[in-house]
């Protein structure tokens, strides 16, 4: 690969690209605490984010973030499963309050503390089921270093636009490895527009129009009272038991992420005419899948590749693409084909084959073998 | 007439509950110190105290049980106008759950006022014992009396560094005492001692608040620490993380024709990670794509240190390494860490320090004393020999990379090359 006159070749990890992109997109603060393999994100944030505060633990992290968010700041944190598990109730709170923020989840080998310095893709089930009631947070997943840039910015913008916590999913190998990378391929990032309620009529914090997204106003503003609560609430943000208005608000929350899904459906598709087999891979396994597809084509096999980047809510596009193929090989670095089972249920259709691994990256050859 | 803090005189508390007194005295106190409702952000959580929200004309944030202090801290961090008042209400149960948040807010002296409604038990959930329940106090979960002693939350928070700590007996008009606390810049902790009319009185008839406090050795009072409130330091941040990355132009050529995988391995302190970073940079300056990742024990200063480097004339997707083309070993730690891979090599190249026994392998073996230039330079010595043997990345590219990384002064390159050529 020859460098061109426009190339700006550097050696970088994905963590650096993520934090730079988020700062440019309008993230105001990083709330950090140390956990491998998210530590680079923390240290880069200390140098780059307008505000960086070291939290004493994971619950405090999400609480501080939500407090910052109620006051109009857009905070980011980065963690791995052990920390994410402790954040969960507070993530539910931020979801219920509809507070913009981004949580970068860097997957590592579990269960429990598992192996901190070993990658994995084992948190899909957790992400699908993390909100009580089964509601979904947008989950974007970076599969390469360009995604570390683009999707990091998109996650910040999405959080602000939809008034919601957003999860940016990655894994140890996906953001810690040093790689040669051409900075000239990165697109400019403009800061997200932070819309604030500006009418003179009293502010109703959870009154939404057809967009299902209520206008935002920060606590502490001098013009309107702002109420927010983690409990079931009416449009005024006042706790209710289960009044029709309050339940309608919860129904709106269920619909909001899906309502806007088309606007944040990201995936790569490389379809070969005549192919009957489709490989589906995301996160770090997408790299091996790209190589596997190239090798298979070199050997004369026709094959297509889908790299989902919006994992949740699940875009219909994925089903429509998979429906076009006789064989689908789903590749993910876990023991139980989590994303495949979320897509198709515990009894997978016969045309779905899976390739998994534990404690190691899936190789291109394993993907080739797994489809046979 | 200015907007009152409360939108109703009828608060949703049981008859005789101290929470009613705190809420009404708070409204009076805030008026006394000249605040308007929209200057105040009231953060509450789960517990009877938390149902005050709907009666307030302030901003209200209602969070999770025991977490309101951390939630309020987040609000406080965002307040550039320090005249805004963040007030956190929580109960003794919430204080038990979120004790760390209270201690941390005190330690950091975050600008907020924490009002602990200490009615000595969890009221909303049915009268269970909390960490602030006095010894001998009867609750629904300790009908024979609480066997444990209660936290002295005032002593804890004062010791932790809160600017202002006060304990107030929840009887009579307490608005002046609250006004003093609400006027503090920094972390103010207010413990208002009450007795729950539903469970406390029921299971502890005839006991008086003053007698209970006395039995605990707790007194009313004010304790201060002369400290400034925490404010976020206004130090300029680096504008761009990418500016720090050196752009590496192609200045060299190498002999690489296809994807090549190299492992460098040794002990911590032998410069394995630095040498592999030099290699990665040299390879990029030779027009190749690279990946590099380190591997070492959790305690990074001891044991093995291994680095995997992929070099390719074309874009590298998968960066894993099942069967390396070359392994460079500088010590026993590294040999042990990579032994299986070395045993599995059917061809390729093994450079190994001459102090080590050569393991079974199909690779071409070169045994050499890499440590003779000093153990810190062992990995770089092996890298220069590798370059010499294979020609994949040239010596000049390595020396340039090393100098560009500012290591020229630190590494005795001439000495190593002298040894290499001899």
Image (cartoon, helix red, strand yellow):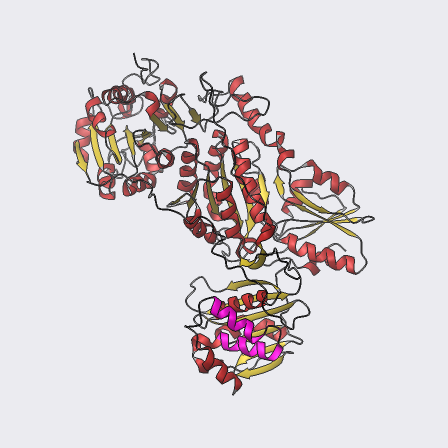
> x and y percent of residue A207 in the render?
51, 21
> x and y percent of residue B240 in the render?
47, 49
Task: Name the one closer to the observer, A187 or A41.
Answer: A187
| Quarter where residue B116 is shown | top left
Q: Classify B274 as above or below A366.
A: below
Query: Is residue A111 visible to the viewer in this orientation of the structure?
Result: no
| Quarter where residue A72 is shown | top left
Task: Name the one closer to the observer, B390 or B297.
Answer: B390
Query: Is residue A57 visible to the viewer in this orientation of the structure?
Result: yes
Question: Total label count?
Answer: 0
Q: Classify B54 as above or below B187.
A: above
> x and y percent of residue B278 in the render?
51, 68
> x and y percent of residue A328 in the render?
74, 47
Residue found at the very far right of the displayed protein:
A274
Q: For the point 55% across and 74% down, which residue is it? A: B396
Residue A301 is left or right of residue A185, and the answer is: right
Image quadrant where one finds the N terminus of chain B:
top left
Q: Is residue B387 found inside the magenta-colored segment of the image?
A: yes
Residue B59 is left or right of residue A262, and the answer is: left
Q: For the point 33% across and 17% down, which residue is it? A: B6
| Magenta part, dominant SS | helix
Task: Name the one closer to the observer, B185 or A308.
Answer: B185
Q: For the magenta stretch, what is the residue range?
A: B379-405
Q: Classify A187 as above or below B125.
A: below
Q: For the point 77% across and 56% down, which residue is it? A: A372
Q: Is residue A289 found inside the magenta-colored segment of the image?
A: no
């Amino acid at each position: 690969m020859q460098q061109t006159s426009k190339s700006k070749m550097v050696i970088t990890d994905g963590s650096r690209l993520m934090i730079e992109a988020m700062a440019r997109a309008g993230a105001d603060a990083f709330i950090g605490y140390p956990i491998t393999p998210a530590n680079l994100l923390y240290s880069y944030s200390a140098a780059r984010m307008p505000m960086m505060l070291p939290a004493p633990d994971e619950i405090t992290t999400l609480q501080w973030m939500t407090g910052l968010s109620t006051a109009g700041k857009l905070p980011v944190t980065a963690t791995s499963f052990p920390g994410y598990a402790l954040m969960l109730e507070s993530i539910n709170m931020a979801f219920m309050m509809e507070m913009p923020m981004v949580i970068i989840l860097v997957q590592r080998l579990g269960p429990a503390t598992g192996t901190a310095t070993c990658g994995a893709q084992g948190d899909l089930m957790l992400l699908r089921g993390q909100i009580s009631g089964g509601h979904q947070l947008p989950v974007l997943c970076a599969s390469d270093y360009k995604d570390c840039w683009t999707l990091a910015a998109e996650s910040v913008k999405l959080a602000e636009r939809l008034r919601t916590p957003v999860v940016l999913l990655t894994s140890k190998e996906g953001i810690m490895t040093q790689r040669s990378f051409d900075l000239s391929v990165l697109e400019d990032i403009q800061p997200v527009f932070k819309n604030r309620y500006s009418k003179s009529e009293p502010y109703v914090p959870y009154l939404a129009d057809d967009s299902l997204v209520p206008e935002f106003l920060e606590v502490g503003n001098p013009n309107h009272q702002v109420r927010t609560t983690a409990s079931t609430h009416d449009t005024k943000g006042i706790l209710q038991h289960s009044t029709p208005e309050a339940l309608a608000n919860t129904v709106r929350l269920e619909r909001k992420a899906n309502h806007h899904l088309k606007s944040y459906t990201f995936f790569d598709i490389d379809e070969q005419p005549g192919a009957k087999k489709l490989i589906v891979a995301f996160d770090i396994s997408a790299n091996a899948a790209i190589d596997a597809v190239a090798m298979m084509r070199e050997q004369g096999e026709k094959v297509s590749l889908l790299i989902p980047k919006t994992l949740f809510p699940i875009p219909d596009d994925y089903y429509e693409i998979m429906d076009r193929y006789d064989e689908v090989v789903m590749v993910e670095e876990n023991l139980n084909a989590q994303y495949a089972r979320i897509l198709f249920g515990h009894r997978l259709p016969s045309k779905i084959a899976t390739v998994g691994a534990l404690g190691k990256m899936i190789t291109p050859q394993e993907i080739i073998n797994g489809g046979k | 007439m200015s907007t009152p803090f409360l939108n109703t005189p009828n608060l949703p508390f049981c008859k005789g509950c101290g929470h009613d007194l705190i809420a009404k005295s708070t409204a009076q106190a805030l008026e006394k110190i000249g605040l308007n409702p929209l200057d105040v952000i009231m953060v509450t959580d789960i517990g009877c105290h938390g149902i005050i929200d709907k009666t307030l004309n302030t901003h209200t944030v209602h969070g999770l049980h025991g977490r309101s202090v951390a939630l309020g801290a987040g609000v406080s961090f965002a307040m550039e106008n320090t005249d805004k008042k963040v007030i956190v209400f929580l109960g003794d149960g919430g204080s038990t759950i979120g004790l760390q948040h209270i201690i941390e807010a005190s330690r950091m002296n975050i600008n907020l006022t924490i009002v602990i409604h200490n009615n000595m038990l969890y009221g909303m959930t049915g009268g269970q014992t909390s960490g602030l329940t006095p010894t001998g106090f009867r609750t629904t979960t300790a009908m024979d009396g609480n066997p444990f002693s209660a936290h002295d939350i005032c002593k804890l928070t004062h010791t932790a560094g809160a600017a202002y700590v006060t304990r107030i007996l929840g009887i009579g008009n307490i608005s002046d005492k609250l006004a003093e606390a609400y006027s503090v810049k920094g972390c103010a902790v207010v413990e208002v001692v009450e007795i729950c009319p539903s469970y406390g009185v029921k299971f502890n008839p005839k006991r008086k608040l003053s007698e209970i406090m006395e039995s605990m050795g707790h007194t009313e009072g004010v304790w201060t620490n002369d400290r400034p409130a925490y404010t976020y330091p206004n130090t300029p941040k680096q504008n761009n993380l990418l500016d720090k990355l050196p752009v590496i132009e192609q200045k060299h050529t190498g002999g690489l024709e296809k994807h090549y995988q190299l492992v460098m391995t040794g002990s911590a302190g032998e410069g394995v990670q630095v040498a592999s970073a030099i290699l990665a940079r040299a390879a990029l300056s030779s027009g190749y794509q690279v990946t590099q990742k380190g591997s070492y024990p959790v305690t990074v200063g001891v044991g093995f240190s291994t680095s995997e480097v992929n070099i390719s004339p074309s874009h590298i997707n998968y960066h894993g390494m099942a069967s390396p083309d070359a392994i460079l070993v500088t010590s026993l730690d590294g040999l042990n860490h990579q032994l299986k891979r070395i045993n599995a090599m059917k061809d390729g190249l093994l450079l190994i320090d001459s102090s080590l026994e050569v393991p079974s392998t199909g690779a071409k073996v070169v045994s050499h004393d890499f440590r003779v230039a000093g153990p810190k330079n062992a990995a770089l010595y092996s890298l220069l020999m590798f370059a010499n043997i294979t020609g994949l990345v040239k010596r000049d590219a390595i020396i340039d990379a090393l100098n560009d990384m500012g290591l020229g002064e630190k590494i005795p390159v001439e000495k190593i090359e002298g040894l290499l050529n001899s």
